[in-house]
Amino acid sequence: MSALSLPSAPNISDPVSLLADPARVARVGAKAYARIVQAWGLDNAAAAGLIGVSARTWTRIKQGEWTGRFSQDQQMRLSAIVGLYKALHLYFSEPLADEWVSLPNTAALFAGRAPVQFMAAGGLPALIDTRNYMDALRGGV
């Protein structure tokens, strides 16, 4: 699968106004996350858990029927996931960029688990650690 197109940044003269519209932020974030979940081949439980929503809410999000707002924690989770997705596609070739999250990983951080298992078990701190790990790989650390 080729790199998927995430929603492009809106062409607005005042970027602060985008952030002032939580409904718009939620729509864009939900759409981007649904595409990443599809690319990564995550099941519903993993998809819901990574962003900290119920299975029912995740079902509405992926069907485009959700009109809610993300909490600050959920926004941070989405940010880490989108950044991780981008880092994976900058570092790895296809299809490894999308498969990487589900493959067992011997790095000390993951201790033989797949990164998605590590992230699901560790919540936001694990999402950030995983993103930082990939950013370090990209930077040659």
Image (tube, rainbow, N blue to C red):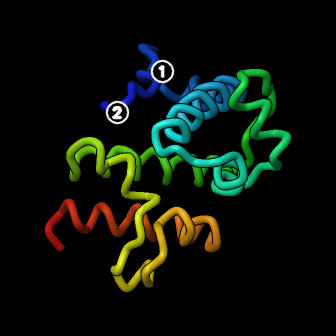
Q: Residues within 10 Å of mark 2 (few under 14, many from 20)?
A: few
Q: Residues within 10 Å of mark 1 (few under 14, many from 20)?
A: few
Judging by the rendered image, the residue that carries numbered circle 2 is 1
Q: Can residue 73 be spotted in the picture? A: no
* Cα–Cα span, label 1 and label 2: 35 Å
Q: Amino acid at mark 2?
A: Met
- Residue 141 against residue 18 in the figure, above or below: below
Instruction: Give the mark nearer the N terminus: 1 vs 2.
Output: 2
- Name the residue located 56 percent from the left edge and 68 percent from the top edge: 117
Q: Looking at the figure, which quarter contains the C terminus? A: bottom left
Percent coordinates x, y for residue 4 in the rendering = 38, 29
- Name the residue located 65 percent from the left edge and 55 percent from the top edge: 46
- Name the residue located 18 percent from the left edge and 63 percent from the top edge: 139
Percent coordinates x, y for residue 44 in the rendering = 70, 46
Is residue 127 left or right of 101 when viewed as pictured?
right
- Residue 92 against residue 117 in the figure, above or below: above
